[in-house]
Each structure stands twice: as C-alpha cells, then as structure tokens.
Image: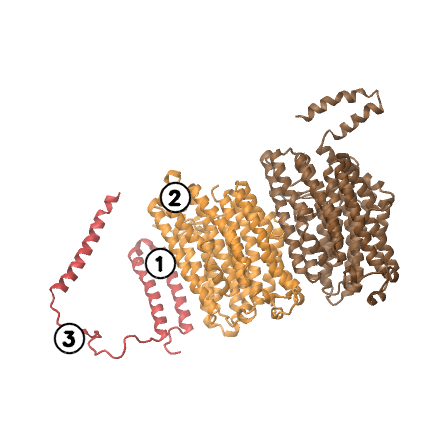
Amino acid sequence: MAGLYIPVLLHFVAVVVLASALLGLSWWVGVKRPTREKLSPYECGIPPVGNARERFSVSFYLVGMLFILFDVEAVFLYPWAVVFKSLKWFGFVEMFLYIAILLAGYIYIWKKGALEWTR
Amino acid sequence: MITLQTADLVRILPEIVLSIFGILVMVLEPFVAAAQKKLLGWMALLGVLAAATATVRTSFEPGLAFGGTIAADEFSIYFIYLFLLTAGLVILGSIDYLERNHAQHGEFYALVLLGTVGMCFMAASTDLIMIFLGLEISSISTYILAGFRRADRLSNEAALKYFLLGSFATAFFLYGIAFVYGLTGTTNLLGLSARLMEPSQWTTFARVALVLMFVGLAFKLSTVPFQVWTPDVYQGAPAPVTAFLSVGPKAAAFAVLLRLFLGGFASAGTVSFWILWISAALTMCLGNLAALWQTNVKRLLAYSSIAHAGYILVGVAAGGSRGISAVLFYLVAYALMNVGAFIMVAHLSGTGERLVQIEDYTGLAFERPGVAACLAVFFLSLAGFPTTAGFLGKFYVFRAAIHSHLIGLTVLALLNSVVSVYYYLRIVVAMYMREGKTEAATVELPWPVRTALAVSVLGIFYLGLAPKLPLGLSTLAALPLPK
Amino acid sequence: MQFAHDHILSIILFIPVVGMIPLFFISGENKQATRWWGNVVMFVDFLASLPLVFWFSREAPDQQFKFIERHNWIPSIGAQYFLGIDGISFLLIMLTTVLGFLAVLSSWTSIQERVKEYYAMFLLLQAGMLGVFMSLDFFLFYVFWEVMLVPMYFIIGVWGGPRKLYAAIKFFLFTLAGSVLMLLGILTLYFRYHADTGLYTFNVLELMKHTWPLNLQYWVFWAFMVGFAIKVPMFPFHTWLPDAHVEAPTAGSVILAGVLLKMGTYGFIRFSLPLLPQASTNPRIVKVMVVLSIIAIIYGALVSLMQRDMKKLIAYSSVSHLGFCTLGIFALNPHGLQGSVIQQVNHGISTGALFLIVGLIYERRHTREIKELGGLSNVMPVYATLFMIVMLSSIGLPLLNGFIGEFTILQGAYEVSWRWAAWAVAGIVLGAAYMLWLYQRTMFGPCENPKNQVLKDLSFREIMTLVPLVIWAFWIGLYPKPFFNVLDKPVNAIVERLNPDFFKAAQSARAPAMSPPAAPASLEMPSHAAGASH
C-alpha cells in the first residue's frame, strides 16, 4: 500500500534537488558586479518614480475581487467544454443556468455601481 | 452518463424555490427605490411561504436524489419546515428593525433566504461533500449578516470573529472529511456506515476523523470549549440576525450531527458517546454559570443558548428514536422561544441597539404590560416552566436520557435548569418588580413584529399544552435515521 | 345539571382561568370594574364548589375517589387529564375556594396599583392551587404545582413590601429546588413502572397498586420529602417563609399560609404515604420526620415569642402549627392523620384570618410593629372582638376549631409514644403564650399613641371578610362530626395501605373482650402474622 507512493516521494525529492541545484549553481558560478541601475526595481524599463508603498483606491480592491470571482467561475467552462459531448442537453441546460446566475450577479454589481471608478 | 430526472428536482424543490427568490431579491435590490425597500422584505417572506408550499410537493415524493447525495425524507422535511419557520419569523421581525436602524437593504433578505438554502441542504444531505457545501452556503451568508450594522464597531467585530472562527471550523470539518475519504474511499453516509460496521475498524485514524468532524460541528453548535466566539458575535450582530444565528445554523449542525453520529458513525460506540457526554455536561454547566454574571441581555441570551445546546446534546447522547425525536421537538421549542426573545430584544433596543442592558428593562411592565408579558413568556419557557414548550422539550430530552440510562447526565441537566431560572428571572424581576422609567417602553411595535411575536407565544403554549401533533411529527421525522 | 355534576371539578378548576380572559379587555384605568369582576369570578368559583358539599357524601360511596374525570392528554408519555377527589382533597378544595374569595375581597382597597394584573394573578393562582388538590396524574399535578408558583412569585415581587425582591426570589428558588427534586422522584417511579410493566403512566392510582422495591422507596421518599418539606415548611427548610410572609401583600400572605403550605402536607398524605408505604413506616424515617416536626413546633413557638413584627410572629407561628400537622401525619394512625387534615383546615382558617387582621391594621397605620400599637380595643371594639375569637381559635381553645385538630393529633401521637405528645403539648403552651401576649400588647392597655386614637373600626366589607372564617371556626369547634366522617374513609385506606394489619389487630384485640363467641377472629391472628411476614 505505502509502496505505491514511493514514486511520488521520489518525484518530490527529485524536484526539490533539481530546483535547489539549479538556483544554487547559478548563484555560485555567476559573476556578481552590482551597479546602482542593476539594483533598482525593474518597471518595464521606465525609471521608478516615488515610493513603492503607496495607497490604492479602494475601488481597485473591489474590481480586483470581482475580477477574480468571475475569472474563477469562468474557469469552470473549461472542464465543462471537455465533457460537453457526453453531457448532451443536460450539460447545456446546466451551464445555461450557471451563466444565468452569474449574469444575475453581474447585473447586481453593475447596478450597485461597483464597477464605476469614481463615485 | 448523468441524467436528470424530474424526481431529483422535486426532491430539492424547497431549496430551488428559496434560491430563486433569493437571487430575485438580490437582483431587484438596485432597481427598487430606497423608500420601497420594504417590498423586498415582503417578497422574501413570499419566498418562504412559496418554499413551504413546495415542501408539501416534495413530501409526496420521498426518496434519494442526485445519486444518493440528497435525501428527501421525513427527517429533512421536518428540518426544512423548522428553517422556514425561523426564516419567516426573522424576516417579519427584521423589516421594521432595519427601517429604524437605517439599514434597509434588500441584501439582508436575500442573505437570509440563501442562508436558509444552505441549512436545508445541510439537513437533507446524505453525502459529506454536500453537507460541506450546505455548511459553506449557510456560513458565508451568516458571516455577512453578522456585520450588517456596518457603522457599528461591535457588529464589525462580530462579523470578523464569526468569519475567522467559522472558517477555522469548516477547515476542521473538511479535514475530517478528507480523513474519512482516505479511510473508506467514500463520502456517502450510507456507504460510510457500511465500511465502518465493525468496532475493530475504528482505528486511531477513524477516531481522529470523528473528532475532527465533531470539532467542526461543535463550533456551529457552540459547545464548550468551542463556544468562545458566541457571546461576542451574538452581542455584536444585529439582534434579528442573532435570532437567525442562534437557531438556524445550530439546528442545521444538529441535523448533521444526528445524521453523522447516529447514522454514518453509528458503530463508533463508546468514542462518540463519551464525546457527546462530556461536551453536553461541560456545555450545560459553563453556559449556565457564565450566564449568571451577564448584565447585557444579548450576552445573557447567548450564554443561555450555549446552555440549551448542552441540553439538546443530552438528547443526542441518549440516541435511539426517543432521543432523536426529543431533539427534534426541542429544536422547534427552542426556535420559537429564542427567535421570539431576540426579536423582542431587537425592538426594545431602540435605534442603534443602545438599550440592551438588563437595567434598561427596569419597570417595563408598568408601561408596556403586553410587551413585558410576552418577554416573560419567552424567558419562562427558556427556563423550562410547565405549560410552555420549554418544559416539554426538556421533559422529552430527559425522558430519552433516562431511558438510555444516562442518569448522571439527567441529574446534571436538571440541576442546571434550576440554576438557569435565576438569570432568566433577573430580567423578569427588572421588568416587573423594580420601579423606574425606561426608554425601552417608548418603542413602537408595528404589526409584522406583533405577528411574529404572537406566532412565537402561541406556538410556545401550543407545544406546551397540546403537544400531541408536534410530538407525533417529531417521532415520524426520527424514523429515517437508523436506530 | 347532569353535565355540571359530571364535570364539577373541571368547572371549579377553569372558572378562574376563563374569568381571566375578560379581565384583559377591561381598561386598566377602570379599577372599580376590575375589582368587581375579580371578586365576582372568585365568588362564582366558590358557589360552583358549594354543590360538592351536598353531593360529596352521596356520590359513589364505595369509590375511593369521586367525581373522576379522565381524558388522554399526551398519550405518548402516558400523561392524562385525570381529576378526582377524596375526603382529604375535598376539604382542602373548600378551604381554597373560601379563602381565595376572602383574600380577593380583602384586597379591595389595599391594592391600588396595577389592579388588573393583580386580579389576573390571583385567578391564575386559584386555578393552580385547585389543580394541585384535584390531580390524580403526576404529570398534571407537577404542572399545576409549578404553575401556581409563578403568580405567587409575582404577587410577592410586585405588590410586596420593601424587601419584596429578596423575598420573592428566595421563595421561588427554594420552592423550585424542592419541586425539581420532587420531579426526579416522580420520574424515578415513572421509569421503574415502565421497566416493570412496559407501560408509561403517571396515573397515581396505578402507581399505588404497584409494589416498589424497598431501596427505591427510600430514595424517592427523600426526594419527595425535600420537595414537600420546603413547601410545608418543615424545620430546616423554613427560612423562606418569614421573608415571603412579611413581604407579601395581605391577600398573598393569606393564601400562602392558608393554602400553599397545605400543599406540602397534602403531598405527604396523598403521595408519600400510600405510594411508599414501606419507606414511610420505616422507624428511622418516622423518627427523623417526627423529630423535625417537634423541633418545628417548639422552635417556631419560641421564635414567635421574640418577634416585634406582628406579621413575622404569625409567620413563625405557622411553622409551629404546621409542625403539628406533620407530627400527626407521621403518627401514621387514623387519629393522627385525621387530626392533621383537620388541623390543616384549621390553620387555613385561623392563620388566614390572623393575616387578614394584621392586614387591616397595616392598611390603617402602615406599620406592623407591635410597640407602635396598643390599647386598640378602646378605639376598634369590633376589630378587637374578631381578633380575640381568631386568636383563641389559633391557640386551640375548646369549642373552637384549633382545639379539635390539636387534640386529635395529640391523641394520635400519644397512641404511638407519650413523649411525642408531651413535646407537642409544650408547643401548645408556648403557642398560647405568644398569642395571648401579642393580643395583650396590641389590644389592651391605654391607647396612648395619638395616631392610634383616630383609627376607624372595621367597615362592613372588612367584617364580611372575617365573619365566614369565624363561623367556620365555630362550626368545626362545636360540631366536627361531618369533617371526621368525610375523612374516615380516605384516612383508613391510607392506614390500611401503610400497615395492612392495623385494623385487624385492633379488631382482634377488642374482639375477645367484647364478644367471647367470636373465637375464630383470634384464631385468624397467626395466619395474619404469617401473611405479613411474606
């Protein structure tokens, strides 16, 4: 019983060993010549401006959360699409209902003004 | 190949109806003018009534649904009616409360309905995964409800505390499910009991699984030592929500406990028995002792509800059809008196829930005899006085306990109910026997609130004086569970 | 008429409950109408109970319990609505209806606040008390026992004196603790009966037919004993009584002393003795009960001597008087038991009247301090006369009721042991001392206090509250035969149950002397003795 899991354990060990070996090797072999530019945070090639610890508008979090909600729910469409053919009409109706409920939520947040940036 | 049969849908018809109304209230909310928000409350109440009608249809077609994950049997139908009753009373009691506290939002009603859906699923599920889903649906709705007085510090504290400890509890429960699945390869309660038939199969791991699931439920039941969140949350949450919290999730958790401990885990024998015995004893004693020192009515009722969970656990520990039907009967009695008491407290507390100390009730009976009499009935029933539902509930539980030879536990429960009389009487004393003027007396009780209170009071006396029918129903509802 | 005859007990029981309903529709401002209605309902209830007096002796002479009404109430637990009375409960029911009406009548002027609630509480209390004396089903009995606790609690707590909260809560918690123990006892019998027969029943008559194991009898006896002894109250459990009496309004005290205390002694007679005969006749238990009774008699009397407050004095005198009642019960012979029931009625009459008398003076002077009063016989002659009769009845003067009760109890006690009787006689002497001294200090001597000099004598209504009691006191004192007749049968049944050989032994002891030819009676003796040893 427990023997079945030995390959899994070996896999874990291999992953850990490989990852730490690669990182450690590059750190050990690599040549380090730090300059001011190299140490500054990378922001798409534009010189960084201001403090990194800035306050964001609360709307940002709101939209962020809503995005994640709908995003995660949209993920469900993928497994559904995979087995769609074997589910037939049942699958179609179920997904229709699912999207309808999502739509209700969408209408709700829209009307509530959660998507408006300035309020 | 999955096929959907009409029977499957009929067997979850109450939940479907409730969900539809919940979503509808939610979607309509932004379209309704601020002055008309009350309408959403009435719509939610209509949903509860529609669901109650739908349950009648369900009861004509009993059986398992969705591959044995849902059971539409007498047990679940009994609980569904219990939840609908609670939700209905809470909605009736909330409409004017929210109006007064300037918190009239349609989401409140939608959340109550959706929370009820979760509870119904908890009671009706025969599969651990479905139970977990029900638990989450009901929990998430109630987390939000607990923080509904957004401007109030205590309400926010309550929501956060309830959320953190609740997530903690569901994690325990989920962990237990994982263990069970690992051990037996199934999450279905029937399959589970088939795999764990022999006492020899109760290895350490199986016991760990049992304890983990009990801990998860114990948070919802607020049994000692998992009760610490209860007073703070009950105090902070808006009082109608507290009414909902103190009855709904607790009753749902008891339904799960009964299905689990007397169904799937029935063979665990001594382990589950001692877990129940010890937590019943601790819960009764600690709940009552702590309640003695409270000065805030909401906290007092919180500790009293902890103590009542202890009494109900005595019935669960007793087991058998007697124990189960006693628990079921007690839950209805508990629902009526607790919801009634909290709704009354909600309305007496005035705007912003300022008047929730026992002193605030001083001399209430002089100016508002009817109000005081109602409250006195609720407290006397909670104290277990004859002619009220509370007395017969306790009587049935103790009878079942003695029948299962739990003499020690019964004596302890009796002593506890004597102690409890003292703190219930403190409020009665304040209302009737101390002179004084109280601002609480100026509160108006609109007719929906009066209706809710009248239903509670009449229900309490009905159960206490002519319990033939309700008792028959609770005996019937106990049948589906294995003996 | 036939309907009324068959349901007489339910009618008496529910008149006060039904009478409560119109009370809710009378405006709270309309105090006069409320008073009228309360009094009318109580009077109608009294009238409804009157036919019992005429029907009782003719009704079903061979039955132990009469006017039986029986319906299923909660079949699944075996609880029934089961009413029925015998001579003992008959007398106590009459006492309740009379005292209930008089107590309500006496509150006409003394209750000025929250009149409606007051009368509602009294009606509920009345129903509860009547139910206790009528129930032959333990579950029903327990329900009434607890139900009457609530209105009494409110009567003390709402309309009581300065320390009403303390007194009310103490009363409630003491009684509740006792009744929960009693409930445990009831449940023990209930489950044992189920274990033996497979039936769930609270029917007292069925339970009485059952033979209980000795060990169980002892446990249940002590559980019942605490429950009833708190109510009586017997010696170590009596501390709630003075507080409750002193703080309660007059009518509350009257009912408390007149009826509520009798529930304890009634419980002993109705339940403890016949249900648990072996435990009740156990010499040690009897000794404990008798010693506690004698302590109560002497202690109550001594403490009464020390009191400065009239009401407290009478409260402690109740402890002493009730000691006689329990002594009579645990003499366990017909005289003791009969005397005990008669004395219970007597105590209801005379102590009820005494509390009314204290109430009358309290209403006028707003004090009950003995030293504040004095020489009242000069200004209130009618009052003084009535007080005198009532006081003499309480002392136990021949020709008045107290004498009959105490004498019969002493007779019963003497038949068992002369020592018991001797101690009890000491209690009577002390009783005479504190009562006479009280009377002397309040009624005789010069009336010096100017406040007392202007007191008005009794009004017609006030006289009417006392006269029925005085008449009743004379009736029992002069012609007690009907009362004994009524009690004969139930008391003999109880004695028979306690000691199956009691009457046979008495008969056969007498038989050879009175009628020599009746030889077979003496021949039967050994066989009875053999039978008893089984």
Chain to which the residue tagged by mark 2 belongs: B
Chain to which the residue tagged by mark 1 belongs: A
Amino acid type shown at disc 1: Phe
Visible in this render: residue B9? no
**Same-chain check, marks 2 and 3:** no
Q: Which of disc 1 and disc 3 is earlier in sequence?
A: 3
Looking at the picture, tell me which residue is in the foreground, C129 or B347. C129
Percent x, y for residue C318? 74, 50
Badge 1 element: helix
Shown colour of chain A? red
Q: At 18% across and 59% down in the image, what residue appears?
A: A20
Quarter of image, res B94: bottom right
Q: Judge depth for marks 2 and 3 and give the one in front.
A: 3
The CA distance from mark 3 to mark 1 is 59 Å
Give the labeled residue for mark 1: A92
The CA distance from mark 2 to mark 3 is 66 Å
Chain the render paints orange: B
Give the labeled residue for mark 3: A35
Give the labeled residue for mark 2: B191
Amino acid type shown at disc 3: Thr
Badge 2 element: helix
Percent x, y for residue C350? 80, 50
Shown colour of chain C? brown
**Total numbered badges shown on the rendered structure:** 3
